[in-house]
Image (cartoon, helix red, strand yellow):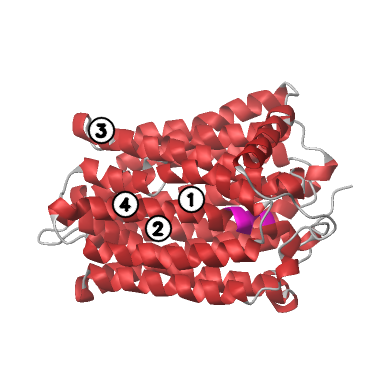
Amino acid sequence: MTVVTTMTYRRLLKENVEFRRLWLGQLVSELGTWFAFIAELGLVRSLSGTAVSASLIVAAHFLPYCLAGPVAGALADRLPRRMLMVAADLGRALFALGFLLATSPDRLWIAYFCAAGLSSLNAFFDAAKNASMPNLAKGEQLLPANALIHAMRFLQMSVGAVVAGLVTEWFGYNAAFGMNAASFCVSAYFVGRIATNALEPDNRGQAEMPAASVASLTADLREAVVFIWRTPLVFAITAINFGWALGGGMAQVINDRFGGIVFAEAGQNGDRGVAILNAGAGIGLMLGMVISNRVGAWVAARRIVGAFIGWMLIGSGLVFALAALAPNIWVMAVVFAVNRMILSAEYAIQDTVLMIAIPDGLRGKVYTIDRSIELAIVGVSALAAGGLFTVLEPGLVPAIAGILMAAPGVIWLSALARGRIRIGREALRL
């Protein structure tokens, strides 16, 4: 029997103090992150101006994650998760300040280096956070908690993008970098107030974990890979994430080219246009997460979660492809908002199913393997987008990206129809 959630967002935040602390920390740090990301794109555009430079800064935010992610996931299942998150926050604050040193074209490497450092530490924070979520928010709290974390992240993407465009215009890029560093310190404060046992599996204290070593971490990762390979549902979800990343990785480079170049107003540096497109995407992502709680209950009650995932992937990809026809930046922003709303509603449900399907002792490792490979593909896709803009008409690039995003949905529905994917009751407690 499927359990339909009656948990509201307000009730969740009121009743679950420990989750509220994590949420508040994320609320601040995500605002700083999007502040800084707009500033980073503007910085490399002002110092270089090429599509390749934009794709490099985007890739630097994703590719290092794939190297740090597996190690981070293994450590999140062995070490205190609160400690990992606080340490990652403080380290990210230092890298955020490093952008202040990228002041000339010959110092652009500093920006790429700091972006890579942020990406690497993001892996440790995300591994501990994702592994902790089913412990922080149990039962009917999990889907709304998962949706609320992502919804606030995407709301901050919109707010941060809009405000960053104004802040960088009035005060320069350094103000955004400083605010980002401060936001990570605030996040560390809130996470540090979470009770340690609220983040750990119930049996963490029953037996001492062996000390981490190269051999033990390798064994942990091998165990996670075997679990993914032998669990059809988990394998299928990770596979569609990888497939989506082939097109999804192009999105930020597309935003930078259209917002900063194609639709840029005369005499402007392009930051405003990039902010508008990111704000549109962020609004859509936030709305999708907000409605996912009710949508999840609706599709779970009708036992159509599998079909919902496939059709939403197809629909969101085809909508993104329509951006190729946008006559101005405002229409493109609306298209991106609709695309992201569909995608985020699907992702909240897909991600919750995945969390439930993975045992706690493997959750950190499996999540970061999935996320690491996905972001590696995103990074390569961003680099490919930079190359495509140099050889194709700009409008063709979002069309290509949208088709690539939709393709995994077709493959998923085909596998579902052939019985290769089954979402059982144990993974359908939405």
Closer to the camera in the image, 108 or 175: 108
Q: Secondary structure at mark 2?
A: helix
**Mark 2 touching mark 1, by CB under 8 A?**
yes
- Mark 4 or mark 1: name the one nearer the start of the chain: 4
* Magenta segment includes 130: yes
- Quick one: label 3, few (<14), some, or many (20+) residues within 10 Å? some
* Picture coordinates of residue 278, whole percent (x, y): 37, 57
- Mark 4 or mark 2: name the one nearer the start of the chain: 4
Q: CA distance from mark 2 to mark 1?
A: 9 Å
Q: Secondary structure at mark 3?
A: helix
Which residues fall within the magenta stretch? 127-131
- Nearer the observer: mark 4 or 1; the answer is 4
* Magenta segment includes 22: no
- Quick one: label 2, few (<14), some, or many (20+) residues within 10 Å? many
Q: Secondary structure at mark 4?
A: helix
Three-letter code, disc 2? Gly
Q: Which residue carries the number 2 mark?
A: 280
Residue at (50% x, 36% y) in the render: 244
Closer to the camera in the image, 268 or 72: 72
The image's mark for residue 113 is 4
Closer to the camera in the image, 311 or 367: 367
Residue at (39% x, 70% y) in the render: 181
Q: CA distance from mark 3 to mark 1?
A: 24 Å
- Quick one: label 1, few (<14), some, or many (20+) residues within 10 Å? many
Q: Which residue carries the number 1 mark?
A: 340
- Mark 2 or mark 1: name the one nearer the start of the chain: 2
Q: CA distance from mark 3 to mark 2?
A: 25 Å
Q: CA distance from mark 3 to mark 4?
A: 21 Å
- Nearer the observer: mark 3 or 1; the answer is 3
